[in-house]
Image: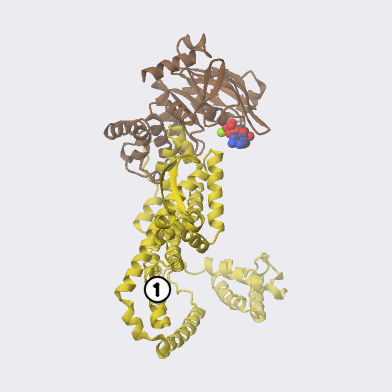
Amino acid sequence: MNSRAGAATRESAAPAPAEASTEPPLMLRARGVRKSFGPLEVLRGIDMDVAAGEVVVLLGPSGSGKSTFLRCINHLETPDGGSIHVAGRLIGFRAQGGRVHHLRPREVTRQRRDIGMVFQHFNLFPHQTVLQNVIEAPVGVLRRPKAEARKRAHGLLARVGLSDKADAYPRQLSGGQQQRVAIARALAMQPKLMLFDEPTSALDPELVGEVLATMRDLAQDGLTMVVVTHEISFAKEAADRVVFMDEGRVLESGPPSVLDRPSNPRTRAFLRRFL
Amino acid sequence: MATAQPPGARDEPEGGEGGGVASAVGAGRPEGAEGAQAAGRTGEEGALAGTPASGDGDTEPGAGTGASTGDGSGSGSGGAEIDVAGAAAVRHPLRWLAVAVLAVLAAQLFHFLFTNPNFEWGTVGSYFTARIIGEGIATTIELTVVAMLIGILLGVLIAVGRMSPNPVLRAVCGAYVWFFRGVPVLVQLVFWYNMSALLPRVSVGVPFGPEFASGQTNHLITPLLAAILGLGLNEAAYMAEIVRGGLLGVDPGQTEASDALGMSRARSLRRIVLPQAMRFIVPPTGSQVINMLKATSLVSVIALSDLLYTVQSIYNRTFETVPLLIVACLWYLVMTSVLYVGQSFIERYYARGATRNAPQSFWDFALFRRRRAPAGPDARAQDTRDPEEPA
Ligand SMILES: Nc1ncnc2c1ncn2[C@@H]1O[C@H](COP(=O)(O)OP(=O)(O)O)[C@@H](O)[C@H]1O
Ligand SMILES: [Mg+2]
């Protein structure tokens, strides 16, 4: 463990010299992230900083590359250029002797433990109960003792308001309940950074509120979050900062008050649809 | 369109009912000119009653079709409410005709079976439970089990290899499937059996270098091993395709979720993807077991005493060919029947929640049983959403 932590700081020292030491420490630092699918340029140089404890809401029209950017952060997609650091560690690559190398799959897998992700379609494991879903990774990946993992899982389920559903199967739950289980499952890994990709877009309108309330609680508890959502109300209430993306670029970014008077005409046009 | 609706139906329930019945009869018959006229008359009455809907209902002879819709709305809105409880079942006279035909054919078959002396049923009976036949059955079962185990284990590995990100592994596994599916299993069996002709000695050592151990191929590859290799390696190619299909059937979001949780590829396969793929893998694997049981009879060509080879070796001596072949047939049927029953249990288990009501079985039909309740408590639990929702 110790030598690994040492290696991590050495790695991060090279590409992130000055910013890494500013306070509060940066949890996410993306610079010039580029990604294409064949001829389609989806990300054209994304810069983004997220401080520890900060909640950033990512807005933008469909197809603007928001999901792709989130998936680059935990290396579900391999970026074509630029760099992403999470908690000071370069994600997916290793800078060594002036050259950059791809990490082995096993090393990428290890890096993902610190980054939680919540999906639009929940992606719960349907063959496992709620409790099994939540303890699967802590027990299987982090090698936590089962009893301890179970105790923590019950605590997390209480936190998302589902104490009584531990033994239910995902199919027996409503969409809102499933998404809250998915949040508990991600939190069980004690991630440093949580990514939410349109967590309420697949829900019936009356179920959106319970998921947003859970996320608001997490934000208040100081979890670092990057949230892609179309829920402007959530951005206004819970975000420290909002970032607008369009066609693979960041158009505008600032405190939630920019939602009321955006300066970029395209941001204005996008927001008008939600008013 | 609105032409032939018996408009009286809406305004005057009594008249409408009468018209409705008349037109229903007409619509039911292909040569329903009469009925159509009847319907037309009803329409006329309606028109006289002052409904604005249609004056031309009476002039069109083809009003029969329209009349049938008029019938539905007429009887539905007028008079007492309909209650579908206790409705008479649809009759299937053709099915009973088919049963009658089959019964005659079956009677003929039984007549043939029991009156033809060449069947030598007495001989069949005496061999059916003979000890030597039992040994042949044991070999057949043993071969089936071992070859299937090899097929399943190797098949899973090959399926995973074919979906690996490693291109070399993908190519090797693809070539395996191509080869073993492309060569008839009978040829493979004979080939393994004759391996010593190709490779008189086998040895373990450094390629082109020193040898650590070696032996005669003939001693190493016994008929039993040749049979196991031939059947098992061939089966692995088919199982690989079945498993691969199952893995592809699992929502890719499941892999993504396990990736995002930091699971290794192997772990996510074992814990998340494979268990879900079982739903697609188990039913065809059941058919493979049944096929394998029958395919083991091919090993009689390499003189391995399975069920078929055992009866062959007996009738080569005694010339009781037909009764001994019948003994083999009966035993194969017994074994496959047991497997069919097992398979249907397994399929029902893995189809839980996939369908709501199973099609009526033959026995339900034959024994006049009503269709069973659509879903057991288990199936229902899968559909139920919990209404209680802590806000
Ligand atoms: N794996 C992929 N292969 C090809 N094109 C993709 C892939 N993933 C995303 N895209 C394309 O990239 C663009 C951006 O997608 P995405 O990041 O999902 O946008 P957003 O989440 O903002 O709606 C879309 O045009 C989409 O079709
Ligand atoms: Mg998206």
Q: In this view, does A237 lie above or below B310?
A: above
CB of mark 1 near ligand 1 (< 8 Å): no
Task: Give x and y (percent) for residue B141.
Answer: 36, 64
Residue under the point 34% across and 39% down: A132
Residue under the point 72% across and 73% down: B60
Q: How many marks?
A: 1
**Is residue A154 found left or right of B244 in the rendered image?**
left
**Is residue A49 found left or right of B332 in the rendered image?**
right
Task: Give x and y (percent) for residue B98.
Answer: 50, 81
Q: Quadrant of the N terminus of chain B?
A: bottom right
- Label 1 sits on residue: B363
Residue B339 visible, this orientation = yes
Task: Give x and y (percent) for residue A122.
Answer: 46, 38
Instruction: Give the chain letter for brown.
Output: A
Q: Which chain carries label 1?
A: B
User: Which quarter of the figure has residue B354?
Assistant: bottom left
Task: Give x and y (percent) for residue B47.
Answer: 66, 70
Residue B356 visible, this orientation = no
Tell which of B75 and A79 is nearer to you: A79
Tell which of B311 and B118 is nearer to you: B311
State the hue of chain B: yellow
Tell which of B131 and B206 is nearer to you: B206
User: Which quarter of the figure has residue B334?
Assistant: bottom left
Whereabouts is ligand 2, in terms of quadrant? top right
